[in-house]
Image: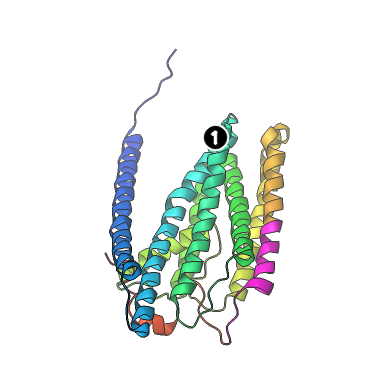
Amino acid sequence: MLQNIQYTKLRWLLTIGGLLLYIADIWTDLALSVKYYHLLKNGFRVVWTNSSKEEETKEVHHRLFCQATDLSMLKLFEAFLESAPQLLLQIYIALHHGDTSIIQYLSMVLSCFNIAWALVDYRRCLRRSLPHVTEMPSGLPTAIYLLYKLCTISSHVLSYSLLLMLSPYSVIALAILWLLATTWSHLLQTHFCSTRSHEMLYRAVVGFILTFTFFNVKGQGTRVAMIVYYFLYSLINMTTPLLLLLLMPEVQTATFFLGITGLIFGNSVLGLVFLVLYYLHLHPREKKREADEVDGLRKEAETGRIRHFLQP
C-alpha cells in the first residue's frame, strides 16, 4: 500500500536549489579548466625552451609556481565546498541505515584523504611561491602534516555525523559555527581579493573550511588562535558522543556507536599529537617571522597576484 506522499512546494524549491548548485559546480569546473590551460601553456614554454638569462628563468618559474598555487587554492575550495558535505552526508546515511558496502567505506576514506591532501598540497605550493619563505620539506614533515590534518578532519566529520544522528536540525548548529568562523575572518580584515564582494565570498568560504579544520587566515603568528580553535575542537569531539548517549540511550546497543566513538577519541588524540610534533620539530623555520598560509607576504600582496586571485 502506497503511503500518502505529496510533492510539496518546499520540495519543488529544494529541487531548484539543487539545480542551481549543479550549474554552479559545472561553472567552477570550467573555470578551473581555463586556469589549468594557462598553466600548461606557460609551463610548456618553460620546459621545452631554454632561456639564456638566469634571472629571467627564475622569474618565469616563480610565476608558474604562483599559478600552481592559485589552482591549488581552487582545488582546496572545491574539496571543502563539495567533498566535505558529501562525506558528511555519506557517513550520516551509513550510520542511519547500517547497510554500507565495502566500496562505500572505501569511498568515504578516499574522500577524507582527498580533503586532507588538498590542504597539504596548497600549503606546499604556497610556501614554494612566496619569496624568502622556506619551502615545506617533503618526506617525513609532509607525512606528519598530512596525518595531523587527516586525523583532525576525520574525527570532526564523525562528530558532526553523530550530531545529525541526534537530530537533523543539528545543521542549525553547524550553520552557527560557520557564521562564527566567517565573522572571525571578517574581524581579521583579510585582504585577499580585488573587490569587496569577492572578499566577502572568500571570508565565507574560509568560514566553511574553519568548521572542519584550522586555516591560517592572515598569514601571521597563530599560536593563540590555534590553541583556542583546538580547545573548542576537542570540546565538540569529546562531548558529542556523550550527548548522543544521554539523549538517545538506545544507541548503546547499536553496533556503530562504540566504533565511531573510538575513532573520534583516537583520531582526536592522534591529530593533536601529530600537530604538536609537526610544529615543534618539523615546521620550516625562518630567521624572521614570515607569513604562513593564506595572504602571504606584504610584498607579495603588493604585486597584485593574490588580490586578483578570484578574477577570471
Could you tell me the amino acid type at mark 1?
Answer: Ile
The residue at 67%/38% (across/down) is 248
Look at the image and tell me whether residue 35 can be seen: yes
- Magenta-drawn stretch contains 281: yes
Instruction: Give the left or right position of residue 108, taking residue 61 as reference.
Output: right
Locate residue 98: give its quadrant. top right
- Magenta-drawn stretch contains 239: no
Q: Which residue is mark 1?
A: 103
| Residues in magenta, as a range | 269-287
Estimate the x, y position of residue 113 in percent, counting from the top left. Answer: 55, 51
Quarter holding the C terminus is: bottom left
User: Residue 154 versus residue 162: which sits nearer the camera?
Assistant: 154
Q: How is the image coloured?
A: rainbow
User: Residue 71 versus residue 177: which sits nearer the camera?
Assistant: 71
Seen in the picture, residue 252 relative to 57 is either above or below; the reply is above
User: What kind of element bears circle 1?
Assistant: helix
Estimate the x, y position of residue 36 in percent, counting from the top left. Answer: 33, 59
Seen in the picture, residue 78 relative to 248 is either above or below; the reply is below
